[in-house]
Amino acid sequence: MSHKRYRVGTVLKLLGPALAVSVLAGAPAQAVVGSVPNAGANLGFVAKVDTGERACTGALINAWWVVTAASCFAVDGQALAPGAPAKPATVTIGRTDLTTTGGHVVAVTTLVPRPDRDLVLAKLARAVRDIAPVPLSTSPAAPDQALTAAGYGRTATEWVPDSLHTAQFTVESAGTTTFAITGLTPDAALCRGDAGGPALREAGGRLELVGLHHTSWQGGCYAETETRRGAVETRVDDLLGWITQNAPVPSSGDFNGDGRADVAGIDGNGDMRLYAGDGAGLLSGGALMWTVQPGGWASFKAIAGGDFNGDGRADVAGIDRNGDLRLYVGDGAGLLSGGALMWTVQPGGWASFKAITGGDFNGDGRADVAGIDGNGDLRLYVGDGAG
């Protein structure tokens, strides 16, 4: 197989600047650019991105963040600046058939572009916890490797398709920040609207994200006369550290919403107080977090922080004098409210517990509670993300 090299962004056409949906070709030639994946394909993490002027594709990488092409959000060809989008933008996740009402449509609040390539992290206004994100690859695409490409862009016959499409490609050559691909079937192509969509590689029985759709000849796409079908992908395999740093899941102890972990504690008067962290190991403050009942925490045996109701804000779970575990919902600005029972199976069942802590211990994106019971055993109580 020859390993052709493509010049990115010059001879190839950008995939983003068009209000269309993406498509990639699969084995059957239903459309020149792809086939509709079956219901068991587990591609709910593939996102349709609508920036107001353009439609692109992206991928959910954790409950709060989607990765896609920076060019989808760029204005008048200028370099994309970090911060809020220039125009309201939304992401549709978990709806591979756009004619249905499943999944989520979530606003984009913040953009974090990567300076050296066509890639941006888009933060969601609320967490998406019922759809498994796609894992990031940590090894580069290699020549002759097979990849699955997915997107919501044009097909051979449709300007704006209403479903996700996939197609099989193979890696032609790899560079420092990009790699070139070509279709494994005659009908495989990337079209307008596919920009930012995922190139996926199977590893260990699961799909992992190895690249994002960047540029393409667009041969075989609707209203195109070009016959060449090669494309270029943006590498993501070398960005795990940068993505982890810039697309964090909110801390279970960030009670005031500033992105830094804080400490909540019960003082000698039975008041719950917030000591704000500065992100460098020091605390300040001491503001009351619960003003409804002064001294109301005096009888609590143990407390734990975590986003137990899935609203993206840190809450407090506490064992009260009756041995009940109760939820006090955080407002993201340092105050608490509520007091709803979190465990109704056995009233007073937490009376013997010596300590509890909050965290996502089973990896489902929802905060759980781990506690040491009266027998000295450490037990896990799985959270449902709704309190």
Image: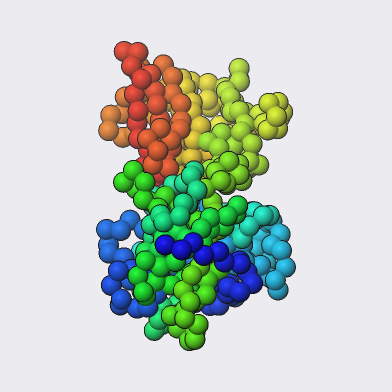
Horizontal and vertical percent position of residue 361: 40, 32
Of 18 and 293, the residue lying toward us: 18
Horizontal and vertical percent position of residue 141: 47, 52
Residue 222 visible? yes
Horizontal and vertical percent position of residue 117: 63, 57
- Quadrant holding the C terminus: top left
Write the residue at 61% across / 74% down: 11
Residue 323 visible? no
The image shows residue 175, relative to residue 13, as above or below, that is above
Write the residue at 48% across / 44% down: 139
Left or right of 197? Residue 131 is left
Q: Report the residue that reaches farthest toward the top.
A: 375
Of 370 and 336, the residue lying toward us: 370
Left or right of 206? Residue 317 is right
**Number of disc labels:** 0
Write the residue at 36% across / 46% down: 203
- Quadrant holding the N terminus: bottom left
Horizontal and vertical percent position of residue 343: 34, 33
Of 79 and 302, the residue lying toward us: 79
